[in-house]
């Protein structure tokens, strides 16, 4: 597979073709060089001959001019500076007048004159083994012919020197061409061997990479939908056949999961790179319903011919994570979670959030993270994010709303940590059910509060309005008793006594009910209260009965708390009066009040009111605090509202009250315990 992506000329067949072309090119160059050499020498030869002809004719014409002026001059002396040049004079009958002209040259001369029919000219003729260049000039008025001749070798001496120099240069060029051809030949041979070794080595490397689950892909940016330039081990790395996936970049990108495709949309699809290299974990579909985790390294290479994207895929084991920590966190967390950078841009989200909101949430990656939430909550989301960026590290949960994939509003409690390495991590709990229940509970409490207010108002109005007719009944029954008591029979007196007693008890019951309805505490009535003073006020109100029953009350130092003085006084008064009322016959009442920090609830005081009366059986521990509940209806008078009022006062002060059931029955008396909030 590797050989298909390297230069085709490095293959064995391509190497043979290149070597043949190199040999043909070398031979062609040599032939052209030799042809050029001979052509140039022929041109130089012809040029030398023509130049010699012109010079010989010029010399001959000069000699004819000299002879015309002085017929007796020796022409050889005129040209004596050129010893290789011979001169002679002939008449029209071929007789030599002066000089020496070989006879066979004379015959060639007159043949040429007869052919050319010109007074001046030149010719080449052979004199033995020597080639001569001859020139003539006819003087018709003197019947003379001036003849000059010289060996051709003398004229071509410079040409021979030039041809030797040119031949040397051409030979050097031929040697250089031959050496270059041999060097290229050997170079191609070595390159072929290197390619073969590289192909063999790469084959081993490819097998190793395949065993490690590694794939390489590459495509040009200008044509991302085109065929991949390189696709080593792709799609074999997915366990598919080589032909199962089209060899295009789009086919590769379509194999990415929605989350990975959204994450890599910028660099791989839209060619928007923050850096020329990225590395991240991706999920790829290896089947219709199964994905596999890979580490992806992408690199953009910019060259003159364009940009190329190269992708390396490495198969990872489940325990391997070769990515940014936030990707590991998001991939493995079971909660809806997001990762946000320092600019407030959403960089990733967990599969749990995508399952809750829908896969379209992946389109928000790369956008401001507050777009996840409802428009009404976005400003508050941004404010809290900014506060965290400014150093607010307080651990707290913030509840914001989002819409799920069905369009319903979901309440999520978000908890953020960071930033770590430029990233803030935020996980959420779905508290929709809790919020809905809280809203229902709030509505129920509001309704209950209104109902309680209505009931208290009703009890107050009823008890207040019943006072007048009850007082009238009591007054008239007492008047009947005073006027007709003893006048009627005994049965009538008994009936009148029942009516008077019932009116008194009804009056007392209504008074207690009115007091119960009016009892209440709010923050506006809460002040610092010294419980020692409150206890003294309660004892002062009960002074008559305390003296009458010879009761003793002891206590340790009581604390200062925040509460309602009147209510707390009523609390102590009810507990003390009950202890005195339910005394044992013949035993003076003794009441001990002890206070200590509550061991079960920090920040509270625990009050213990202990008496030596008849006591209360543990089975009635919860019943006695209910409205109108009385244990001794016949022996003791009362309305059954005293302990109910005590419970209401204690609870309105944030505490609780109960009967100590751990006191043994052999130890007569009752112990009531209640708690009140301490100052602080």
Image: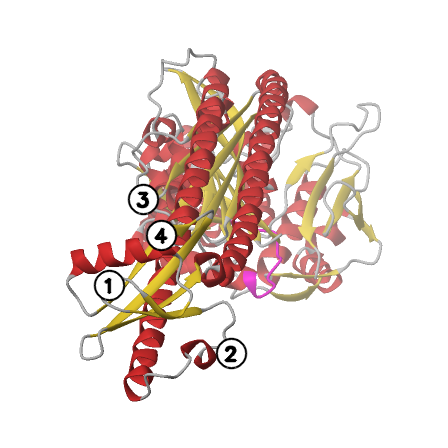
Question: Which of pointers 4 and 2 lies earlier in the amino acid sequence?
Answer: 2
Examine the rendered structure and indicate whether residue 587 appears above or below residue 596: above
- Where residue 648 sits, quadrant-wise, is top right
Q: In the image, is 461 to the left or to the right of 127?
A: left
- Is residue 451 rendered to the left or right of residue 544? left
In primary-sequence order, the first of circles 3 and 4 is: 4
Where residue 107 appears, as percent x and y from the top left, is 29, 54
Q: Is residue 390 magenta-colored?
A: yes
User: What is the residue that sits farthest to the bottom in this orientation?
Assistant: 69
Nearest to the eye among marks 2 and 3: give it: 2
Mark 1 or 4, closer to the camera: 1
Mark 3–mark 4 distance (CA, rounded to whole Å): 87 Å
Q: Which mark is residue 93?
A: 1
The magenta stretch is: 389-397
Q: Nearer the viewer, mark 1 or mark 3?
A: 1
Relative to residue 299, is residue 281 depicted above or below? above
Q: Which residue is mark 3?
A: 222
Q: Camera-side residue: 336 or 637?
A: 336
The reply to whether the C-beta atoms of the residues labelled 3 and 4 are less than 8 Å apart is no
Residue neighbourhood size for the residue with mark 3, other residues' Cα within 10 Å, grouped as few (<14), some (14–19), many (≥20):
few
Give the number of the disc on residue 104: 4
């Amino acid at each position: 597979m590797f050989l298909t992506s390297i230069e085709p000329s490095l293959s064995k067949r391509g190497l043979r073709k290149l070597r043949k072309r190199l040999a043909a090119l070398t031979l062609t160059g040599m032939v052209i060089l030799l042809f050029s050499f001979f052509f140039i020498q022929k041109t130089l030869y012809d040029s030398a001959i023509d130049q010699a002809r012109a010079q010989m004719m010029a010399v001959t014409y000069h000699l004819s001019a000299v002879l015309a002026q002085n017929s007796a001059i020796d022409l050889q002396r005129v040209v004596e500076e050129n010893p290789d040049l011979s001169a002679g004079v002939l008449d029209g009958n071929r007789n030599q007048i002066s000089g020496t002209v070989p006879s066979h040259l004379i015959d060639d001369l007159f043949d040429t004159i007869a052919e050319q029919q010109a007074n001046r000219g030149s010719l080449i003729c052979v004199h033995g083994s020597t080639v001569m260049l001859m020139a003539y000039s006819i003087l018709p008025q003197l019947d003379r012919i001036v003849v000059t001749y010289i060996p051709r070798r003398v004229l071509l001496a410079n040409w021979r020197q030039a041809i030797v120099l040119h031949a040397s240069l051409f030979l050097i060029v031929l040697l250089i061409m031959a050496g270059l051809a041999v060097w290229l030949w050997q170079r191609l041979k070595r390159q072929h061997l290197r390619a073969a070794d590289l192909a063999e080595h790469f084959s081993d490397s490819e097998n190793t990479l395949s065993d490690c689950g590694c794939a390489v892909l590459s495509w040009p940016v200008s044509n991302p939908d085109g065929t991949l330039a390189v696709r080593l081990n792709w799609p074999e790395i997915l366990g598919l056949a080589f032909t199962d996936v089209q060899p295009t970049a789009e086919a590769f990108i379509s194999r990415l999961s929605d989350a990975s495709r959204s994450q890599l949309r910028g660099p791989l699809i839209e060619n928007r790179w923050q850096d020329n290299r990225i590395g991240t974990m991706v999920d790829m579909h290896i089947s219709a319903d199964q994905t596999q985790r890979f580490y992806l390294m992408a690199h953009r290479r910019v060259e003159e011919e364009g940009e190329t994207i190269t992708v390396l895929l490495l198969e990872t084991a489940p325990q391997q994570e070769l990515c940014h920590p936030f990707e590991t966190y998001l991939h493995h967390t079971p909660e809806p979670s997001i990762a946000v950078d320092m600019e407030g841009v959403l960089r990733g989200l967990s599969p749990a959030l995508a399952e809750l909101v829908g896969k379209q949430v992946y389109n928000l990656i790369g956008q401001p993270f507050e777009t996840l939430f409802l428009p009404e909550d976005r400003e508050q989301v941004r404010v809290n994010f900014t506060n965290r960026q400014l150093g607010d590290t307080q651990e707290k949960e913030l509840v914001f709303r989002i819409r799920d994939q069905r369009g319903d509003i979901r309440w999520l409690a978000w908890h953020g940590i960071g930033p770590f390495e430029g990233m803030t991590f935020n996980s959420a709990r779905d508290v929709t059910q809790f919020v809905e229940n809280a809203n229902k509970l709030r509505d129920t409490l509001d309704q209950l509060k209104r109902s309680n207010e209505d009931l208290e108002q009703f009890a107050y109005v009823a008890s207040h309005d019943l006072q007048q007719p009850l007082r009238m009944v009591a007054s008239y029954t007492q008047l009947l008793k005073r006027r007709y008591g003893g006048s009627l029979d005994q049965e009538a007196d008994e009936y009148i006594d029942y009516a008077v007693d019932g009116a008194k008890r009804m009056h007392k019951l209504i008074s207690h009910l009115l007091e119960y309805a009016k009892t209440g505490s709010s923050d506006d009535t809460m002040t610092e209260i010294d419980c020692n003073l409150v206890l003294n006020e309660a004892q002062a109100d009960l002074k008559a009965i305390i003296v009458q029953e010879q009761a003793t009350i002891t206590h340790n130092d009581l604390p200062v708390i925040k509460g309602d003085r009147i209510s707390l006084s009523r609390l102590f008064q009810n507990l003390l009066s009950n202890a005195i009322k339910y005394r044992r016959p013949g035993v003076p009442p003794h009441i001990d009040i002890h206070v200590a920090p509550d061991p079960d609830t920090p920040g509270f005081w625990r009050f213990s009111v202990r008496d030596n009366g008849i006591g209360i059986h543990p089975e009635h521990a919860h019943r006695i605090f209910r409205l109108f509940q009385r244990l001794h209806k016949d022996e003791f008078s009362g309305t059954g509202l005293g302990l109910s009022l005590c419970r209401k006062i204690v609870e309105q002060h944030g505490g609780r009250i109960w009967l100590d059931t751990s006191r043994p029955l052999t130890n007569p008396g009752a112990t009531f315990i209640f708690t009140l909030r301490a100052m602080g």
